[in-house]
Image: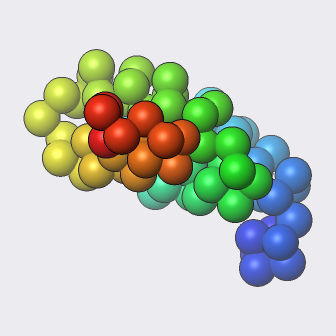
Amino acid sequence: LYMAKADTANALKVIEAGRALHPNNLNLIYDELNVYLARGQASKQISKIESAIAQEPKNKTLHFVAGVAYASNKQFDKA
C-alpha cells in the first residue's frame, strides 16, 4: 500500500518490522530491495542479502537478488 503511494519511508518501516519477525522471508527481502532500489540505495541491502545467502547458500533466488543489488550498485564483478 505504501509503495503504491510511493511512500518508501513508511513502506520500509513495515518491511523492517516484518523482517525482524521473519528475517529470511524472501518476499520481505524482495520488497526491501525494491524500496532501496527505488531510493537508489541498493548498497544498503547487499549486506542483508549476503547474510541470507550465508544461511541458505543453495537458494538460487537469493543469488539472483544479490546480483540485482550488485548491478544496481555498479559492482558488476560480483553481479
Q: Does residue 27 appear to the left or right of 4 in the view shown?
A: left
Quarter of the image containing the C terminus?
top left
In the image, residue 65 lies at what x, y percent? 37, 49
At 18% from the left and 47% from the top, the residue drawn is: 60
At 87% from the left and 65% from the top, the residue drawn is: 7
Q: Is residue 8 above or below residue 42?
A: below
Q: Does residue 63 appear to the left or right of 45 in the view shown?
A: left
Total numbered labels? 0
Q: How is the image coloured?
A: rainbow
In the image, residue 5 lies at what x, y percent? 85, 78
In the image, residue 63 lies at what x, y percent? 26, 42
Quarter of the image containing the N terminus?
bottom right
In the image, residue 26 lies at what x, y percent? 40, 49
Q: Is residue 52 visible?
A: yes
Q: Is residue 4 above or below residue 19?
A: below
Foreground of the two, 68 or 76: 76
Outermost residue, left side: 58
